[in-house]
Amino acid sequence: MNKIDSREITRDGITYRVDVYPDTDATPNDADCYSPADIAAWRRDDWHFVGVVVTPIVNGVEIGGADASLWGLQYGWAPSWRRYIDTDELVGEYPVPDMIADIAGRLADGITAKRAELLATADKLAA
């Protein structure tokens, strides 16, 4: 699947790669919130659905299993939105900041658990 866009941003010493992909499974028929004008704009390819994948990178190494994705997001312009939704908006407003917070929390939990495991092993070795 070809990427639409990709960005890297850094938060608290962790780099996050944000990849935007077309979501070919979603259509305006999946929800009842789209006007006939919005659906016509979708058919003209003025807007489409995308998926966002956020991958944490620490010291140049992707942290496998810690990434997050969200699909079925609107991207482009439709009459009822009154704004153009692009990668800048996805990264700056929604959903990427929430996804990064979730990933950072999971990474911190993993570090805390690994630290406790190492301390328990050190205690056993010292005994």
Image (cartoon, helix red, strand yellow):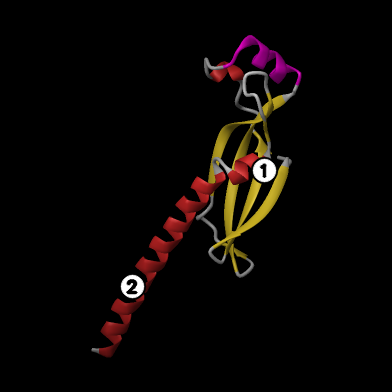
Mark 1 and mark 2 lie on one chain; the one further toward the N terminus is 1
In the picture, residue 11 is in which quadrant?
A: bottom right
Residue 23 lies, in percent from the top left, at 64, 32
Identity of the residue drawn at 32% across and 78% down: 119
Residue located farthest toward the top when viewing the structure as drawn: 36
Q: Which residues are magenta?
A: 34-44
Identity of the residue drawn at 67% across and 12% down: 37
> In the picture provided, is 73 more to the left or to the right than 124?
right
Q: Is residue 18 magenta?
A: no
Residue 116 lies, in percent from the top left, at 32, 72
Secondary structure under tag 2 reads helix
> Does residue 3 appear anywhere in the picture?
no
Judged by depth in the image, the label closer to the viewer, 1 or 2, is 1
Residue 9 lies, in percent from the top left, at 63, 56
Going by the numbered disc 1, the residue's amino acid type is Asp
Q: Is residue 48 above or below residue 113?
A: above
In the picture, residue 25 is in which quadrant?
A: top right
Q: Spatial distance from mark 1 to mark 2, Cα to Cα?
A: 40 Å
> Does residue 101 appear anywhere in the picture?
yes
The total number of labels drawn is 2
Residue located farthest toward the bottom when viewing the structure as drawn: 126
Considering the image in quadrants, where does the N terminus appear?
top right
Circle 2 sits on which residue? 117
> In the picture provided, is 120 more to the left or to the right than 96?
left
Circle 1 sits on which residue? 88
Identity of the residue drawn at 63% across and 40% down: 89
Please identify the dominant SS of the magenta region.
helix
